[in-house]
Image (cartoon, rainbow, N blue to C red):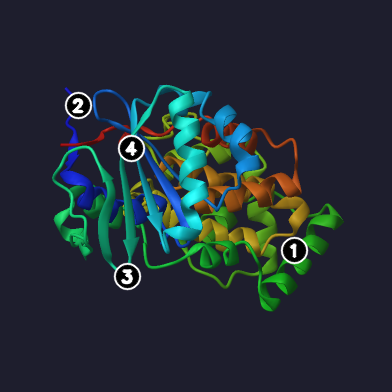
Amino acid sequence: MRTHRPLRGQGQLLTYIPYQLRFRPLDSVVLCGFDRRGLLLVVARFDPLDIQDAADAKALFASGKLAELDFATLVVFGEVEPLCTTVEVLRDALESSGALVAHLCAVQDDHWWALECSCGECPRRPVLLPAAEEVAPAVRAIVSGADASIDRADIEALARPDRAEAALAEQVRRLLATGDTAADLDALGAVLTTDAPWSAETLAAAVETLDDIQVRDAVLHRMCPREFAFGAPGCDDPLLGLAPADDFSDTSGAQWAQHLAGVARRVPTARSAQVWAMVAALEWAGGGGALATVALDAALTADPEHRLAGLVRRCLHHGAMPRDLTEVRTA
């Protein structure tokens, strides 16, 4: 039987949101969508919307997991008045798909209050948010590597190489262009299990190794064995000779995503799609969306037809979430 980790009340839900998103939302509206059992299906952040966005919003809520919502909490992060139109566009889209807005809440400066409340128990004046250590799903997210102290600009910066990283990526590009670089599991292991800096030769060999989809899938399995059940180690394990699986087990999917983002920044754009797609897949598996979206943009810029990136994008667009998120419910 599945054990549900409860979020007790709207205050705990609001505390959990940054750990689910993996960053602090600012000047935006966050949708928390539930099914009729009270299971949390979707956590999605929306930038300010205009009335002309209404048709697109209705189309979005008519597909995927969003079409399965029974009720929702809308949360305004920032000043309420500038986001009133966004709230109304989302409310209209939800109601058009048969879902009700059960709560409308606001969060400012670590305080929260309800603008609309269906339970009759929410404060109408600002009160402190519960501490994260009081919220079981937030604690689990923290343990898995979620850092709610960063904002969207910090996440977008993860996809931009600095001058030294760009210079190294150019060296890697030149090595790969010669055609003399060969796949090398030892090089891949060095890149995966040690921190930067790496040599251009090591990075080039690691890129060649990850081009083998069986190797890539086996790496994803080692990083997140529960979420990526394919490529299980065995007699035909393509990673035999790489670091033991136990070397991967103490690092969470979110931490692996951050590590691989550092690898991707040091790889030439034309060859970076595979690594960025892995970043997106690991973030999706952890329930995150912001870094996954940034990584997808980078992957699909490098290769618009990349299959793993396309699959993760469809999962995000249709609200298909990994198992852990669907186990969270309100109580």
Q: Earlier in the sequence, mark 1 or mark 2?
A: 2
- Residue 299 location (% of width, % of height): 67, 47
Q: Position of residue 69 (x, y in %)?
A: 38, 26
Residue that badge 4 annotates: 325
Secondary structure beneath label 3: loop
Residue 143 visible within the image: no
What residue is shown with label 2? 2
Real-space Cα separation, disc 4 to disc 2, in angstroms:
12 Å
* Element type at mark 4: helix
Q: Earlier in the sequence, mark 4 or mark 3?
A: 3
Q: Earlier in the sequence, mark 3 or mark 2?
A: 2
Q: Is residue 292 above or below residue 330?
A: below
Viewer can see residue 50: yes
Residue at image mark 3: 109
Name the residue type under label 3: Asp
The answer to which of 126 and 276 lies nearer the viewer is: 126
Q: Which residue is painted at 79% across and 61% down in the image?
A: 173
* Secondary structure category for the residue under label 1: helix
The residue positioned farthest toward the bottom in the image shown? 163
Residue 142, horizontal then vertical, whole percent: 29, 57
Circle nearer the viewer, 3 or 2: 3
In the rendered image, which residue does mark 1 sit on?
172
**Residue 188 higher or lower than 228, as above or below:** below
Q: Residue at x 69, y 64 (%)?
A: 201
- The answer for how far apart the CA atoms under marks 1 and 4 are is 38 Å
